[in-house]
């Protein structure tokens, strides 16, 4: 990166590693993921909201939280995280994200307005603060672009939080999420100003890669939290102990599959990319899918640890098999972004999980979980064999 007279932008001398304040912020998102997971577990077990309605609601809440985290990470990957203005915004984000996380359990009920108003206040407030405190630096046009798009989605979030009725709220918030993510993906195209992604001029590649890796580890940590909580509340029977061991082994496999080559080379891939801003955006979406898959997989762990034997409700397969499938889909996208191709083992794993569905409905929950673990083991084993017979790979991003 180049040196710059603007004290807000990173320079060559700015450290690339995440600051302690950024890691402190991540602790809030650990809590947020546990609240999302708890909602889903309740939806799969008590049926008050219905599984499919609960999944949709949890997804909207998750996407809102992920958008908050993503914008923060991109900002601190091209702005100096040690600058007082940037640190103030991180603290604002911490307070806002914590408030949203607290509202998650009743995010479509009594606390919907709290969730929505906090989200809108945080997203718009950060942009306004940057613009005013930074005296228009580093690029006032970017503030206008982001405010234009937030101005489109903000009324939908607020009205959705205030109306009575989950169906209307769900429709309004779905439209709001689509607007927010369209803006994020396209770089907030605005009349007369065009589009520009965050960090298009300079990105601290090592910092950005580390932040994605850290958040994925947070998701794995949340899965471990679910495993420990489920098993500590059980009777420690042999079948439940088997579910505990199986869940831990599956978590290790998820870690292994992610970090095997592509997950550990994100920084190099961004450095080598012809369009690092686009690659950074696409990596954010790939990690979003993987993290959603990990959270859903953790819900599956809870289900087959607490009720390992007996009848398997078909809806439980959404978590037990769908979670690993979602993770592999995101991991396949990441591999393409880093190397410009997708390994057959990933595609084979996705196919195997799909073919297991009609068979798994006749199995017990623990057996279905074991089948998913076998597929993950096959993918990890194929990666290990490929590493032994190939020379180290070099990232070759497709763009």
Image (cartoon, rainbow, N blue to C red):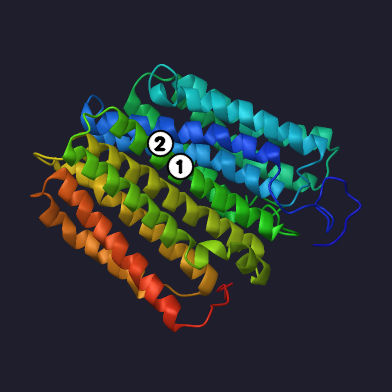
Badge 1 crowding class, 10 Å Cα cut-off, few under 14, some 14 to 19, many 20 or more, is some
Q: In which quarter of the image is residue 240?
A: top left
**Farthest top residue in view:** 110
Disc 1 from disc 2: Cα separation: 6 Å
Question: Which residue is at the front of the view, 21 or 55?
Answer: 21
**Rendered residue at 88%/55% (across/down):** 4
Which residue is denoted by mark 2 in the rendering?
Answer: 225
Q: Quadrant of the C terminus?
A: bottom right
**Rendered residue at 75%/43% (across/down):** 81
x then y, percent, for residue 330: 42, 58
Q: Is mark 1 on a helix, strand or loop?
A: helix
Res. 118 mark: none
**Rendered residue at 22%/26% (across/down):** 46
Which residue is denoted by mark 1 in the rendering?
Answer: 221
Whether tag 1 and tag 2 are in contact, CB under 8 A, the answer is yes
Residue 248 showing in the rendered view: yes
x then y, percent, for residue 376: 31, 60
- Is residue 364 positioned above or below 330 on the image? above
- Is residue 14 positioned above or below 87 on the image? below
């Amino acid at each position: 990166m180049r040196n710059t007279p603007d004290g807000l932008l990173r320079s060559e001398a700015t450290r690339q590693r995440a600051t302690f304040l950024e890691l402190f912020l991540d602790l809030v998102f650990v809590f947020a993921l546990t609240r999302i997971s708890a909602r889903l577990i309740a939806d799969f077990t008590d049926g008050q909201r219905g599984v499919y309605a609960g999944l949709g609601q949890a997804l909207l809440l998750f996407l809102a939280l992920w958008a908050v985290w993503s914008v923060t990470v991109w900002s601190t990957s091209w702005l100096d995280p040690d600058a007082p203005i940037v640190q103030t915004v991180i603290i604002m984000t911490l307070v806002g994200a914590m408030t949203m996380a607290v509202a998650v359990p009743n995010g479509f009920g009594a606390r919907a307005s709290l969730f929505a108003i906090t989200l809108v206040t945080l997203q718009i407030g950060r942009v306004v603060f940057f613009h005013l405190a930074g005296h228009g630096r580093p690029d006032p046009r970017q503030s206008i672009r982001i405010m234009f798009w937030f101005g489109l989605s903000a009324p939908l979030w607020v009205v959705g939080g205030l109306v009575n009725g989950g169906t209307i709220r769900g429709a309004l918030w779905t439209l709001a999420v689509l607007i927010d993510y369209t803006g994020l993906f396209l770089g907030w195209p605005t009349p007369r100003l065009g589009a520009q992604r965050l960090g298009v001029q300079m990105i601290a590649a090592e910092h950005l890669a580390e932040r994605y890796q850290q958040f994925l580890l947070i998701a794995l940590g949340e899965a471990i939290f679910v495993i420990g909580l489920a098993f500590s509340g059980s009777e420690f029977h042999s079948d439940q102990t088997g579910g505990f061991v199986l869940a831990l082994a599956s978590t290790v496999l998820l870690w292994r599959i992610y970090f095997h080559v592509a997950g550990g080379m994100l920084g190099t891939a961004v450095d080598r990319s012809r369009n690092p801003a686009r690659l950074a955006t696409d990596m954010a979406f790939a990690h979003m899918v993987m993290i959603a898959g990990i959270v859903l997989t953790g819900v599956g762990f809870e289900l087959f640890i607490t009720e390992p034997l007996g009848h398997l409700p078909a809806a439980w397969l959404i978590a037990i098999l769908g979670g690993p499938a979602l993770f592999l889909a995101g991991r396949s996208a990441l591999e393409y972004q880093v190397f410009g191709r997708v390994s057959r083992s990933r595609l084979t794993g996705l196919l195997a999980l799909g073919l297991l569905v009609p068979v798994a409905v006749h199995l017990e929950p623990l057996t279905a979980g074991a089948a998913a673990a076998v597929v993950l083991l096959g993918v990890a084993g194929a990666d290990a064999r490929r590493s032994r017979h190939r020379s180290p790979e070099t990232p070759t991003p497709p763009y």
